[in-house]
Image (cartoon, grey):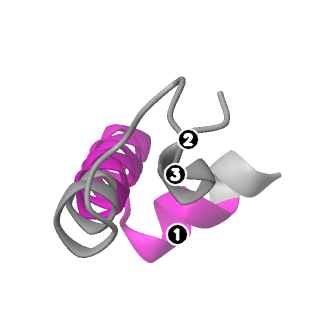
Amino acid sequence: MGGARMRELGVQSWRLAVVAQVLGVAACVMVLVWCIHFRGGLAFVATNKSLIFNV
């Protein structure tokens, strides 16, 4: 049902997949820049608890 609707709109599924991947990578890059630049870095073990990255 969704596939037929997408074909009616003229949107191909691979294009949506590429857009989703690009947006996901962009979000990851922005979070990494925010953590490193604006928060002062990342750490797994540190005396400054705000630097610890919770994996």
Instruction: Kindly check if marks 3 and 1 are in contact, taking CB atoms under 8 A apart as contact.
Output: no
Image point (40%, 51%), residue name? 20
Q: Which mark is residue 52?
A: 2
Q: Is residue 9 above or below residue 24?
A: below
Chief secondary structure of the magenta span?
helix
Residues at marks 3 and 1, CA–CA distance in whole angstroms: 55 Å
Q: For the image shown, how many numbered marks are present on the structure?
A: 3
Q: Whole-percent x and y of residue 16?
A: 39, 53
> Magenta includes 11?
yes
Give the quarter of the figure containing the C terminus: top right
What secondary structure is marked by label 2?
Answer: loop
Three-letter amino acid code at the position of disc 1: Glu
Q: CA distance from mark 3 to mark 2?
A: 8 Å
Left or right: 45, with 11 as reference point: right
Q: Quadrant of residue 53?
A: top right
Which sits earlier in the primary sequence, circle 1 or circle 2? 1
Front residue (pair 4, 14): 14
Q: Residue furthest front?
A: 47
Give the labeled residue for mark 1.
8
Question: Which residue type does callout 3 highlight?
Answer: Asn
Position of residue 42 relative to residue 30, above or below, is above
Q: Please check the rendered image and state whether residue 29 is part of the magenta-colored stretch, yes or no.
A: yes
Residue denoted by label 3: 48
Give the extent of the magenta segment: 5-31
* Residue 10 on image: x %, y %: 36, 67
Q: Residues within 10 Å of mark 3 (few under 14, many from 20)?
A: few
Q: Residue at x 66, y 65 (%)?
A: 5
Disc 3 to disc 2: CB gap under 8 Å: no
Q: Is residue 43 left or right of residue 8?
A: left
x and y percentages locating residue 26 in the rendered image: 24, 57
Mark 1 secondary-structure assignment:
helix
